[in-house]
Amino acid sequence: MASKLDLDPRVVRAARRLAARAGQPVVDLARSHTTVSVERAVLRLAGVHGADQDGIPWVNRLVDAVRADVGLGHGVAVPVFHAMRSTGVDDVTVLAQKAAAGAVRFDVPGKKADAATARRAAARATGRGLKIVDRRRAERDRLIKRLGDPRQRPWIYLIVATGDIYEDIPQAQAAARAGADVIAVIRSTGQSLLDYVPEGATREGFAGTYATQENFRLMRAALDETSKELGRYVRLTNYASGLCMPEIAALAGMERLDMMLNDSMYGILFRDINPIRTFVDQRFSRQVHARAGIIINTGEDNYLTTADAVEAAHTVTVSQLLNEFFAHEAGLADWQLGLGHAFEINPEVPESFRLELAHALLARELFPDAPLKWMPPTKHMTGDVFRGNLLDGFFNLVGALTGQGILLVGMMTEAVVTPWLSDRDIALQNVRYVLTGAGNLHEDFVPAPGGFIQQRAHAVLGEAVELLEKIVDDSLLTAIAEGTFGIMKRPADRGKGLDGVARHDDDYYNPVTVALEEAP
Amino acid sequence: MASKLDLDPRVVRAARRLAARAGQPVVDLARSHTTVSVERAVLRLAGVHGADQDGIPWVNRLVDAVRADVGLGHGVAVPVFHAMRSTGVDDVTVLAQKAAAGAVRFDVPGKKADAATARRAAARATGRGLKIVDRRRAERDRLIKRLGDPRQRPWIYLIVATGDIYEDIPQAQAAARAGADVIAVIRSTGQSLLDYVPEGATREGFAGTYATQENFRLMRAALDETSKELGRYVRLTNYASGLCMPEIAALAGMERLDMMLNDSMYGILFRDINPIRTFVDQRFSRQVHARAGIIINTGEDNYLTTADAVEAAHTVTVSQLLNEFFAHEAGLADWQLGLGHAFEINPEVPESFRLELAHALLARELFPDAPLKWMPPTKHMTGDVFRGNLLDGFFNLVGALTGQGILLVGMMTEAVVTPWLSDRDIALQNVRYVLTGAGNLHEDFVPAPGGFIQQRAHAVLGEAVELLEKIVDDSLLTAIAEGTFGIMKRPADRGKGLDGVARHDDDYYNPVTVALEEAP
Amino acid sequence: MTIVRPYGDTTGDGMVQLSFTLPIPHDKRAEGAAVQLANKMGMDPALLVHAKPMGDEFTFFVVYGRVNHLVDTEQVQVVERDFPLLSAKEVNATIKRRLRRRLSVVGACIGTDAHTVGIDAILNLKGIAGEKGLEYYSELSVTNMGAQVSVPDLVETARERKADAVLVSQVVTQRDAHLQNTRAMSAAFREALPAGKRPLLIVGGPRFDELMAAELGVDRIFTRGTTPREVASYLVHAITGSTS
Amino acid sequence: MTIVRPYGDTTGDGMVQLSFTLPIPHDKRAEGAAVQLANKMGMDPALLVHAKPMGDEFTFFVVYGRVNHLVDTEQVQVVERDFPLLSAKEVNATIKRRLRRRLSVVGACIGTDAHTVGIDAILNLKGIAGEKGLEYYSELSVTNMGAQVSVPDLVETARERKADAVLVSQVVTQRDAHLQNTRAMSAAFREALPAGKRPLLIVGGPRFDELMAAELGVDRIFTRGTTPREVASYLVHAITGSTS
Ligand code: B12
Ligand code: B12
Ligand SMILES: Cc1ncc(COP(=O)(O)O)c(C=O)c1O
Ligand SMILES: Cc1ncc(COP(=O)(O)O)c(C=O)c1O
């Protein structure tokens, strides 16, 4: 798409440079810390699976045991694989069970050679986990080659959210048959604050279904079937977010999920998770996503549900630039960056539609190679479902006019219920109408030079640069503490999960990070 | 609005020239014939009012009596006013009553002087009628000056259709308060084929309310009240169409209606009224509208309910050019030409929205000074009211993007019922959203040079010119007989109301036509 | 499945959406009144999700909720197609064989109704949905009288054309216009012609209830989405008494 | 007016619009089933105007029709505001006069609910709809615990802060999460504190039924469109027992 905004490339470059400077201290923090969830992710890749009879996964029991004995600062890999050798257990899950029973004591080997042996064993084990991830990625490539990608852009992204994986599956299949290219299974409200990943197939979520390895597997298998039936690869999305972000990323890689909600700040702002915890988990999970060929979806859209979409438009841009910087640093390529933004301007505001166009185009032109995730109206949706379907139509039109990559389909019942089967059908019909009738209208959409849309986009970019300068001066953690994003104030020393963070000791070893960082 | 289609002005001029050549024979026909309804209109302006106890208006009884005695070819004015003098009756309505009782014999005065006296008396009487029309027009101008016109273009045009004037009134007032600039009272299904105008306030219409002088008066008075309340002059529309077109035009002028549905071919095509009858009635009614300062609305939109909106797009253009020619000939100014067209392309057709834009822009640029009446989707509306509201939104958007003058508001229940109160409310909310949010988007809508939209518009104009050439060769009456418009075949010697047509005798005299044609 | 409930997003949840206007100003009591109506309709819980004043005297409501009624699909009465669907060839062949003459059909929009698109779709060559209309069938003789035909004219023409079947379309339904006109039409035929001589009476239109044929005094009713082939097949079945 | 009917376009016409899905494939029987449901809801005639298959196993319907129920506005039960609406000044003055100390308010979203916009609108300075939130009132001492607060933490904080009132928000309603959480909360307060010492319990959220306060064990329920001033006025009324 040719440039429609006439952005000044120098300003764009300046913005990127500032984002890098603002983000670097956080990257340094992430590189020098680990968390319980990072370590559990390592163990999951190393082959620990299953849970005790209370449903607490063995990875949790094992990490807790290691931590109790030697702390987290060395990483769990060496203590665990050293213990494997010293106890003669050759299955890590069995070791975890023994450890949970108090039958194993962990330590950091004093001898260099022992440490090296443990490291090698750990790397071999996690290497097998990463192999699974690689195989899944190759499998996806093969399936896409065989079955094909969606015929159109944007990809049509639909949510299922019954709370019951066995209701979700037929609904997801129905949605795919009706035209969805991407299915997202929304998570139960409570899950992001659980410091463990539930096990098995689940039927009791609230307003969403638990993210579990088994649910991932069941849904992916069902969609593989439907993909074959439809001759089009249907992608599956879930959430690598909350206290278990790294582990869920690992499970997603091993079960061939295709996209993951994964934002650098969402957990901080909207789940009150500690900022340091989030940034550390964040970096690891993105490294895994990079390896797995997973497209991430960031969460800037959420800011506009708490802040005003016009006033706070530039905070979205700033966050997108930061998310891009963190993503690149973690090894993600541009095609994997489903940066978020949303159609959330109050529809009563004069020129609301043109403002939406300006904001959406700005994102499009700042990140020309990223797919971009375009989110529908939610905040200004009401119980008036007739009006709701109308707004969704204009949202779809902005998506088509500005070349968004991933269109999250809006539901007329947004303010009422989690989507009904018929809501999705009506919503897809809406998308189809807009794409069929006006899918190429972007050819005739030429913002007047120096006109309302261009001016607005330039103004937002200008405000974004100013805000970035301030963040560079004060630090990102301060900005977050002060409520810069989504008007949520989140100080760095507060929030959930801080006690699961540990500074690296000098001998910190994480075979997964090593492998991911050495890969091309 | 600057030109967006880059139409060739030579082609446009050629099209207009052809339309004039195609229309002239029909004008000649109209100038050399009269009809029962034209004559009744003359008598209404001359002061005949009321009806007998069967509800047959005295104008009908009087014209029938004159016709029985001397035929219509002289016009009724002279025989009637001659009889007034000879019987000594000085109230035309009383004369009509006597004539109905068989107590008056009419003849055409043999003496030149008697004829001249009768002519003068008739002209004086109809002059009083035209004065009323003039006063009403001045009144409208004053009210508009005092209260003001709608703040935005397009004007928002809403229909009421309960069948009962006393339900219509509060609904119309509610609609005006909710934002309607123009209220149209739809007529009962049967009325257009009645060869008389019903009398009094009526409550028993089917899918519409009878057009009567009293209903006009009641509704205009109610809307005057509401106009004052709102500080904005709310216009009233009805139908000068069907067998009584001339009379209804006269009544509309005397009751200060502001717009009238009035098409040169609608009655022929959709009511199977004889073509000659229609063209004669048509010309007279337009002359009255011109005098009354009434804006006419033509009916090209209807063609697209029977013919395909893509295939038959050029027939709309041809008809608009003919309607324009006939209107100018009858004395209407450009600002009075609400030429019709509609959003009726099957929404499943690829590029349907861009095609709609092309067609709507073509009308806009061909008739830059006419207000244009933009009609909503009807044919492809279904019982899916959610989809219906969406289509109406995109219809509204085309209206805003292409600068239409009068937006007939679409109803989500189009395929279900005549509009409910809530349908209108939802529909107005839809219009408001689109105009508030995207009312100025036309600044950024620039059809790609040589692209899809321009090409389509040029193609339709080209087809229109070709069709006009054929009509010039074969005659318009032949074209109508062959089903050129709306695929309805209507031969000139068939259809209702032909027996009410008469050729002018040499001494034909119509004081109203004379007055209207001599006015500036 | 014979007993089912409405489905929102979970089997058995019974969820439905409802909207309506009440002629009362918007306040808490009006919202309560809206919920009362929904409750009376069997919705419980009834969630009032939208209330909007329209002027001072009316309020529009949207309600979502669970409805307690069960639907028993076994109890559903429908007019099932009780005749085979024939091809044009079969239709023509059967008429030839059984009737040994062309079958005469007279069609019209009666009363003040001028919606001819539906009856034209059935009668005219052009047809609908890719199917040709009855004029295409060589063994059918079709007279299409067009719109706003009066009942006496229709009876007269049917008599003249020795109609085997009369096809009437009614689209306008406000104040039950379609029902009134149909009753008037069937009464006129009953009056004008003795039982054995009466043509088959068929009405069609998007808002008829197919179950009302007897009540309206006609032989068959066709509604939304009817195709010419169905009508032709029915004609053959009902007039030639043939099943193929 | 006490007895009213729904209004389509004529007084007394009783017209309503209904839509729903049935878990059956689309055919005539399904359409009949849809009409059956509408009839059971009291719609007669019920006009099926839209039926759309969604996959092989579900069909979506839109029905219009006349509903026979009457609505009696006298019978409507509503929680009317039974306290005067005060200005911020009056609120502060009354607390000062009657309580002689600041009134302590603790607010939270409990359970797994993280929708804080609603409670923040009531509590935070910023407020909503042009009205400042409770933090703006000098005589109110506000503790906003934020989202996903557990009931034990809430009880603990209420005790610590000597809360006069506890304000809880619940937005997620799937599977009646809001009702369950509210019941758990009120039970915990009943258990933890003797009757005289318990703070006033208030819940709010867009999908509550205001009539359910007693059933849920709370003192008051606020729903859609609540403003901070209403809440402040209620607090003053309920805690200081004052009417001004
Ligand atoms: C096209 C149309 C018109 C055209 C008609 C052109 C023409 N020559 O037919 C024009 C523009 C002239 C028109 C005018 C009016 N219309 Co009109 N019109 C429509 C519209 C948009 C589509 C109808 C249509 O063509 N459907 C397509 C055909 C193929 O479907 P169908 O008729 O259902 O036919 C199928 C079946 O029902 C069946 N069938 C039908 N008849 C028969 C007969 C037999 C024997 C058989 C076997 C089968 C059969 O087979 C057909 C094929 O499947 C509808 C709205 C809508 N979207 O439905 C309004 C609508 C029907 N019109 C309506 C009205 C009120 C009018 C007017 C009265 C308005 C006015 N007062 O000015 C006028 C006057 C018309 C009159 N005197 O009757 C209302 C009727 C409301 C009601 N339920 O009572 C509607 C619903 C719009 C609305 N919501 O207000 N209209
Ligand atoms: C904003 C929003 C979010 C934001 C929340 C940000 C935040 N910090 O609050 C984000 C993006 C994070 C979010 C996330 C989710 N959301 Co959400 N969200 C919404 C949305 C769009 C608007 C809600 C809102 O802010 N309304 C505005 C406020 C001012 O209104 P209010 O809450 O009704 O409050 C007023 C009154 O009710 C009252 N009130 C409310 N509380 C209280 C308390 C007291 C004491 C008093 C006196 C008064 C009072 O006063 C307020 C002012 O008038 C709605 C859809 C919609 N349009 O309604 C969905 C919605 C509420 N979310 C929903 C869901 C399912 C979720 C998720 C669970 C999805 C998922 N699985 O990921 C997540 C997780 C959230 C969680 N754990 O709870 C569903 C709930 C479905 C249901 N009925 O059960 C909704 C309806 C969307 C949908 N259709 O699916 N969401
Ligand atoms: C980036 C991101 N992560 C996660 C979530 C989901 O939140 P939860 O943590 O409740 O699963 C969202 C919600 O939309 C999101 O946008
Ligand atoms: C130009 C025109 N005249 C008249 C009518 C109304 O027709 P009727 O003659 O039934 O009143 C219409 C219908 O929309 C129309 O477009």
Image (cartoon, coloured by chain):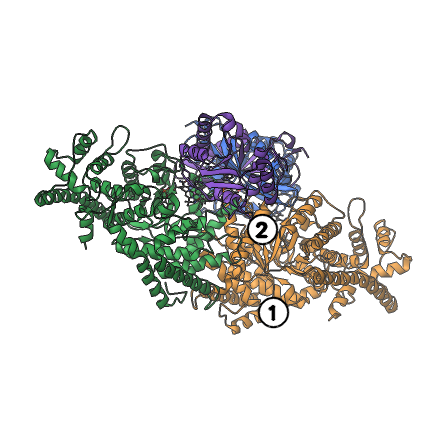
Chain colours: A orange, B green, C purple, D blue
Residue type at mark 2 is Leu
A145 to the left or right of A439: right
Q: With respect to residue B314, does D240 lie above or below? A: above
Residue A172 x/y as whole percent: 67, 49
Between marks 2 and 1 in the image, the one whose residue lies nearer the viewer: 2
Q: Secondary structure at mark 1?
A: helix
Instruction: Sort mark 1 into few (<14), some (14-19) or many (20+) by Cα contacts within 10 Å.
Output: many
Q: Secondary structure at mark 2?
A: helix
User: What's the chain of the residue with tag 1?
Assistant: A
Furthest-right residue in this view: A88
The answer as to whether callout 2 falls within 8 Å of ligand 2 is no
Q: Nearer the viewer, residue B503 or A124?
A: B503
Q: What residue is pinned by disc 1?
A: A20
Q: Residue at x 34, y 39 (%)?
A: B193
Furthest-front residue in this view: C100
Q: What residue is pinned by disc 2?
A: A428
Instruction: Sort mark 2 into few (<14), some (14-19) or many (20+) by Cα contacts within 10 Å.
Output: many
B508 to the left or right of D42: left
Q: First in sequence, mark 2 or 1: give its number.
A: 1
Residue type at mark 1 is Ala
Q: Residue at x 56, y 65 (%)?
A: A471
